[in-house]
Image (spheres, rainbow, N blue to C red):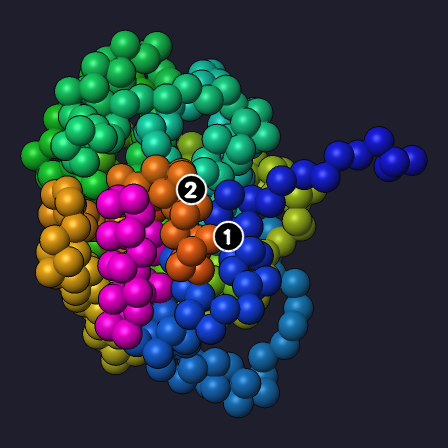
Amino acid sequence: VFNHLLRAPEDPILGVTVAYNKDPSPVKLNLGVGAYRTEEGKPLVLNVVRKVEQQLINDLSRNKEYLPIVGLADFNKLSAKLIFGADSPAIQENRVTTVQCLSGTGSLRVGGEFLAKHYHQRTIYLPTPTWGNHPKVFNLAGLSVETYRYYAPATRGLDFQGFLEDLGSAPSGSIVLLHACAHNPTGVDPTLEQWEQIRQLIRSKALLPFFDSAYQGFASGSLDADAQPVRLFVADGGELLVAQSYAKNLGLYGERVGALSIVCKSADVASRVESQLKLVIRPMYSNPPIHGASIVAGILKDGDLFNEWTIELKAMADRIISMRQQLFDALRSRETPGDWSHIIKQIGMFTFTGLNAEQVSFMTNEYHIYMTSDGRISMAGLSSKTVPHLADAIHAAVTR
Ligand code: LMR
């Protein structure tokens, strides 16, 4: 009965890893997926994660019962505190509902389905470009997807004018997807002053902000600083949604741990929203997994472990920043044509190199360097040892 099926293409991001795994070359390098690697090119499990996992194993009072539909209560409370700040008025006034979801993607999907069912506007505006999964998540959630200008290829920076114009002409009430920090794939973020202008425009047009916060702590190395754009919107008392992921900042990729928070106008509305979120979640995956959320809650509720986490997080962010400098220096020393200063200016895990699909495929075929065809490279996958190889490949690709 499935004879008619055509083979579907691999995912544009995760498929890069599939291709990389098949390559027998000893010099191959995977700069596709945004996943942190050590200087030795190995995945990293944070020490705080190991510690809490050990505590969880030793605690024989724990069991494997189902979590509630909305997930682990402690995890939800602490996640809201992490993104909104402990003294957030929305938390103090009980106007936030937070549900544990399957990492960032699952949080976006649950939020998208909730909006498609219960919000009066069905259109969501995504930045151009955006994470490749965003349009698919929201389309399948039942929303219709439009775009707003975000990145200016000419300056390799923010197209702030285009951004404001496009949101300015969006129908009132439209949903706007915003990357909370470390925009994926461009690494280009608005300044705080620009965020304030964006906020004023969004509120004046009664647009509904939906933040994707997948990199809190990775942009600046500070969890609070990276949450500022979200907190700016919470401070004005208006409504918003936030999808949080602990994949990158706690290295919990495969544990699929994240949260969706919806800030409402009153505690009563928030509790009704939560009751409806349960109806979205139950038929989708019933209730979320317990292990990853227990790790996160263990870290967030313990002052010492929390501090240890911030140090480990800062070390990851700093290593990425040092990779930016090393790659920039390597291209300069090769006198590679072009202005590569965007490598050190962009923020977070990725550099949006400006290399085109044909140059990317040359680098993959000739140098065994794997990256997404839009020219995005995951700086987190790079090390001092592999920088020269990447610089050689970029040099060859642009001087061909
Ligand atoms: C990425 O953009 O590489 C990450 O967010 C991983 C993913 O799921 O695509």
The outermost residue toward the left is 193
Q: Position of residue 284 (x, y in %)?
A: 66, 43
Q: Is residue 219 left or right of residue 265?
A: left
Residue 399 visible in the shown view: yes
Is residue 192 positioned above or below 51 on the image?
A: above
Mark 2 — residue?
373
Question: In this rendering, is residue 81 above or below 312?
Answer: above
Residue with the most extreme front position: 400
**Coordinates of residue 270 in the picture (x, y in percent):** 42, 37
The part of the chain drawn in magenta is 377-400
The quadrant of the picture occupied by the N terminus is top right
**Residue displayed at 63% across by 76% down:** 63
The x and y percentages for residue 268 are 42, 35
Residue 143 drawn at (x, y percent): 52, 23
The three-letter code of the residue at mark 2 reads Ser
Residue 116 highlighted magenta (yes or no): no
Q: Earlier in the sequence, mark 2 or mark 1?
A: 1
Determine the residue positioned at 25% across, 59% down. Answer: 391
Mark 1 lies on residue: 16
What kind of secondary structure does the magenta stretch mostly adopt?
helix
Residue type pointed to by label 1: Val
Q: How far is mark 2 from mark 1, CA to CA? A: 9 Å
